[in-house]
Image: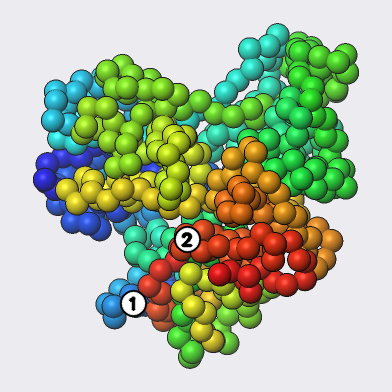
């Protein structure tokens, strides 16, 4: 195992009011799961990641745009009509699965419902 | 008052949300969350899908991390079943568990959930006649799913989710629904028929309008289900999915008004004005704006949103629970999403999708949109959930014209 594989991923969550919180994640968990499990407000993830609720909308920092698989069809459809208007860097954070050592910066929209 | 000891009985989705939200809102007293299962609060929806497919581990289902409870100073007590409450007025009291352990509290939240209804039929206690509610049930079901024939009694969400999962794994599956159509309590007959056809295409046999009469077995294990019309279905395993009963015994024993659930107001307050009840165990005013009926809601959305609203009551800044209820059910290739609560008589405007297997059934009461039943149509679901939440209309006449995307019709 390389050194990088032993490093925990980190997610930097910025609330819509600018307050940032850094959470140490587990590799294989999504940005949504990491937020919910650690009580980061503003990411609801009610459906648990089955792409059914679109309550885990985030704005993914552009520097990470290529670090994740592209937006899927259902994700695309749901983001189009998300509670907070979609932007170019909108993602459903249940689709952002973290690799060992990965650092990700996301901003949480004002509302999810 | 946002100090003192808060006791939350029931460590499911609603209980976990109460402790999270109340801390977020500044409750600075101590908090104890007591659950009867040996697991920290976890997500139940995957139990009928990913868990049965062996795609997920119990650890991956947890709703909050161990660090969360530690950092938020929540004392999580597992494997303890509270069996008795003594309320001393003003919301304080004592809770006693079956083990004899007890907790004094200043405020109490009941999040005791619901338990699966069982059938009072001959043979219902045979080995292999099972229910699905918690992780232990799912582990039993997953282990036994290598049978040739599964009979699912009850054509609701859980029964159909398991039917689809099992059929995809190569099991011969028959669904037996006593009512005239599948998911009769939640969707229109139009949607039910289209969903039925999809299940049949996937190899599931669906029987409606017929009841099971008895379960037959050999050497204590189930081998067949006999139906009221004389049909005999071979069955190595039977899942009974015929709804759930709210766990309100604890509240009733403490003298709180219960009527098929702990009766609460829009602030989640029970009849003593202090004790709160949230989630599946509560009988509550419909949170839909403008509705004046009462109901129980068994859904993740309700568990989470009612719990959040209840937290505002706890910290002395009570906000009524309002919102548009929504549900989802993943059944094999069908992603079913429902926004809003239709009444049984609400009319249907069917909008076929641009591809087979996708459609949306809009429900109207007069000219007013009340709900949408979306199958493999997540964009429509989002549009309607948002429109209903914002009190915006989707013209019935315009909606009947197929080909114009729903999102362009929101007024």
In the figure, A81 relative to B54: above or below? below
Residue A44 appears in which quarter of the rendering?
A: bottom left
Residue B224 appears in which quarter of the rendering?
A: top right
Residue nearer the viewer, B91 or B172: B91
Residue nearer the viewer, B404 or B149: B404
Residue shown at 65%/30% (left/top)?
Answer: B241
Q: Position of residue B15 (x, y in %)?
A: 36, 42
- Horizontal side of residue B341 vs A84, given as left or right: right
Residue shown at 16%/39% (left/top)?
Answer: B5
Distance in Å between CA atoms under marks 1 and 2: 25 Å
Residue B284 visible in the picture = yes
In the figure, B125 relative to B367: above or below? above
* Label 2 neighbour load within 10 Å: few <14, some 14-19, many 20+: few
Residue A16 image label: 1
Which chain hosts label 2?
Answer: B
Q: Quadrant of the C terminus of chain B?
A: bottom right
Q: Position of residue A42 (x, y in %)?
A: 38, 66
- Horizontal side of residue B147 vs B306, given as left or right: right
Residue B69 visible in the picture = no
Q: Secondary structure at mark 2?
A: loop
Q: Which residue is mark 2?
A: B391
- Horizontal side of residue B238 vs A44, given as left or right: right
Q: Position of residue B170 (x, y in %)?
A: 84, 43
From the image, state whether disc 1 or disc 2 is nearer to you. 2
Q: Position of residue B248 (x, y in %)?
A: 39, 24
- Looking at this rendering, what residue extends furthest in the bottom direction? A63
Residue nearer the viewer, B63 or B355: B355
Residue B379 appears in which quarter of the rendering?
A: bottom right
Q: Secondary structure at mark 1?
A: loop
Number of numbered labels in the structure image: 2
Which chain hosts label 1?
Answer: A
- Horizontal side of residue A103 vs B359, given as left or right: left
């Amino acid at each position: 195992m390389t050194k990088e594989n032993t490093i925990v991923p980190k997610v930097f969550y910025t609330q819509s009011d600018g307050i940032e919180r850094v959470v140490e994640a587990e590799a294989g968990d999504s940005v949504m799961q990491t937020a919910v499990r650690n009580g980061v407000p503003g990411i609801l993830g009610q459906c648990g990641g089955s792409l059914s609720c679109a309550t885990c909308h985030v704005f993914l920092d552009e520097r990470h745009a290529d670090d994740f698989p592209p937006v899927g069809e259902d994700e695309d459809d749901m983001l189009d009509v998300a509670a907070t208007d979609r932007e170019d860097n909108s993602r459903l954070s249940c689709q952002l699965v973290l690799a060992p050592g990965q650092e990700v910066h996301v901003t949480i929209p004002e509302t999810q419902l | 008052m946002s100090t003192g000891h808060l006791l939350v009985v029931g460590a499911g989705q609603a209980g976990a949300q109460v402790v999270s939200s109340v801390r977020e809102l500044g409750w600075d007293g101590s908090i104890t969350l007591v659950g009867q299962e040996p697991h920290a609060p976890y997500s139940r929806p995957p139990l009928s899908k990913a868990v049965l497919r062996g795609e997920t581990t119990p650890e991956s289902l947890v709703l909050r991390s161990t660090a969360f409870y530690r950092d938020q100073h929540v004392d999580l007590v597992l494997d303890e079943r509270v069996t008795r409450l003594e309320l001393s007025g003003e919301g304080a009291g004592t809770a006693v568990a079956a083990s004899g352990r007890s907790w004094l509290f200043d405020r109490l939240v009941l999040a005791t959930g619901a338990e699966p209804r069982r059938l009072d039929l001959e043979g219902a206690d045979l080995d292999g006649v099972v229910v699905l509610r918690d992780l232990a049930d799912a582990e039993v079901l997953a282990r036994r799913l290598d049978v040739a024939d599964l009979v699912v009694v009850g054509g609701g969400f859980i029964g159909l989710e398991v039917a689809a999962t099992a059929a995809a794994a190569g099991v011969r599956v028959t669904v037996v629904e006593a009512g005239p159509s599948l998911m009769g309590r939640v969707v229109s007959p139009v949607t039910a028929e289209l969903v039925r056809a999809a299940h049949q295409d996937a190899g599931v046999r669906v029987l409606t309008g017929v009841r099971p009469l008895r379960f037959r077995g050999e050497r204590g294990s189930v081998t067949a289900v006999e139906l009221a019309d004389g049909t005999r279905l071979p069955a190595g395993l039977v899942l009974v999915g015929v709804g759930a009963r709210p766990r309100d015994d604890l509240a009733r024993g403490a003298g709180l008004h219960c009527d098929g659930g702990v009766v609460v107001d829009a602030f989640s307050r029970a009849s003593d004005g202090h004790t709160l009840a949230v989630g599946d165990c509560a009988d509550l005013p419909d949170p839909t704006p403008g509705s004046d009926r009462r109901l129980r809601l068994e859904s993740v959305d309700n568990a989470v949103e009612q719990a959040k609203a209840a937290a505002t009551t706890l910290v002395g800044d009570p906000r009524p629970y309002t919102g548009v209820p929504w549900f989802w059910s993943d059944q094999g290739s069908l992603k079913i999403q429902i926004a809003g609560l239709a009444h049984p008589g609400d009319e249907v405007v069917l909008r076929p999708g641009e591809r087979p297997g996708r459609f949306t059934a809009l429900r109207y009461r007069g000219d007013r949109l009340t709900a949408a039943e979306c199958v493999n149509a997540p964009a429509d679901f989002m549009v309607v959930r948002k429109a209903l939440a914002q009190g915006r209309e989707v013209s019935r006449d315009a909606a009947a014209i197929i080909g114009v995307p729903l999102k362009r019709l929101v007024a």
